[in-house]
Image (tube, rainbow, N blue to C red):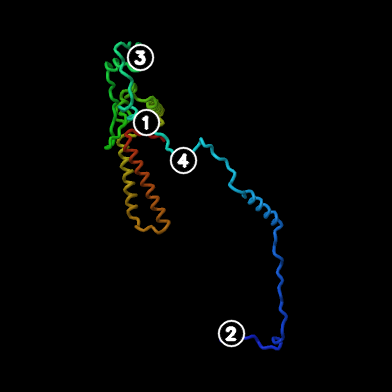
């Protein structure tokens, strides 16, 4: 009871007080209440009858039969075995005096079929262990391309290309011949070609020696640029050496 706090004592608390009565608002009533009641009564009154309901009585001729209300399954079609079983009635055997039917024709001529040459099986190729097969013509194993009329012949576009190359070489040869006759170009001798080749190799060795003397760590831009210049010069010398070694005949313009 330590937590309970009594109200402070006052003289005014001893005076009687008038009880305040709160007035509730009137209850809500819908304006459609009476209409709903009438509609509900009208629907109920329609099902009220005096005695048994007036319904159509079935005719005595249409009486309920046995299993008439059970669901029936659709009839199954007769199978080939049932249709051709021994229970089916066959037509009677014709009498001895009956005349045979003349002029009957069948869709298939059995005499020609028996005397015809049997059809050869189509060549196939089995490409899997499970027996999958395909026509041999589509498998790529049949050498059908060698039977073409133009097999082994050079295509036309290659012939045109070879003719263009020959024509370009002939024009270059004629141009070099004209320049040499005019004295504008001279042919290097074999000794001069070997001397030029030896000089290029010496220059390449010198540059390669300088390249090997570079430091392992390139930390400045100057060293990096010097290394790139050496690599570019060695690459150019290698190209020149391969060019001189490949061509035995070299023409240079006269000064």
Return the x and y of residue 248 as percentages of the image width and height: 32, 34
Q: Secondary structure at mark 4?
A: loop
Estimate the spatial distance between the alpha carbons at disc 3 and disc 4, rounded to whole Å: 53 Å
Residue 181 visible, this angle = no
Q: Quadrant of residue 85?
A: top left
Q: Which residue is mark 4?
A: 69
Return the x and y of residue 232 as percentages of the image width and height: 39, 47
Q: Secondary structure at mark 3?
A: loop
Q: Are marks 1 and 4 in contact (CB under 8 Å)?
A: no
Q: Residue at x 31, y 31 (%)?
A: 134
Q: Which residue is mark 3?
A: 105
Return the x and y of residue 115 as percentages of the image width and height: 27, 16
Q: Residues within 10 Å of mark 4 (few under 14, many from 20)?
A: few
Q: Which residue is mark 2?
A: 4
Image quarter of the N terminus: bottom right
Q: Nearer the viewer, residue 15 or 41?
A: 41
Q: Residues within 10 Å of mark 2 (few under 14, many from 20)?
A: few
Marks 2, 3: nearer the viewer? 3
Q: Which residue is mark 1?
A: 78
Mark 3 vs 4, N-terminal side: 4
Marks 3, 4: nearer the viewer? 4
Estimate the spatial distance between the alpha carbons at disc 3 and disc 1, rounded to whole Å: 30 Å
Return the x and y of residue 138 as percentages of the image width and height: 33, 30
Mark 2 vs 1, N-terminal side: 2
Estimate the spatial distance between the alpha carbons at disc 2 and disc 4, rounded to whole Å: 81 Å
């Amino acid at each position: 009871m330590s937590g309970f706090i009594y109200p402070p004592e006052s003289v005014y608390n001893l005076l009687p007080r008038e009880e305040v009565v709160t007035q509730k608002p009137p209850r809500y009533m819908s304006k459609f209440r009476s209409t709903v009641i009438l509609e509900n009564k009208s629907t109920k009154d329609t099902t009220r009858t005096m005695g048994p309901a007036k319904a159509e009585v079935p005719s005595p001729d249409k009486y309920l039969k046995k299993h008439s209300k059970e669901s029936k399954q659709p009839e199954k079609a007769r199978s080939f075995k049932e249709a051709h079983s021994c229970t089916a009635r066959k037509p009677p055997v014709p009498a001895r005096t009956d005349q045979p039917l003349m002029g009957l024709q069948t869709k298939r001529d059995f005499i020609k079929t028996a005397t015809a040459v049997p059809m050869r099986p189509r060549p196939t190729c089995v490409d899997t262990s499970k027996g999958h097969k395909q026509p041999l013509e589509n498998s790529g194993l049949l050498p059908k391309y060698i039977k073409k009329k133009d097999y082994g012949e050079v295509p036309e576009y290659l012939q045109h290309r070879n003719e263009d190359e020959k024509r370009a070489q002939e024009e270059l040869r004629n141009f070099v011949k004209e320049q040499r006759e005019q004295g504008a170009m001279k042919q290097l001798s074999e000794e001069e070609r070997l001397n030029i080749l030896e000089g290029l190799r010496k220059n390449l060795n010198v540059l390669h020696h300088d390249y090997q003397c570079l430091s392992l760590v390139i930390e400045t831009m100057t060293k990096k640029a010097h290394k790139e210049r050496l690599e570019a010069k060695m690459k150019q010398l290698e190209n020149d050496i391969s060019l001189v070694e490949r061509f035995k005949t070299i023409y240079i313009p006269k000064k």
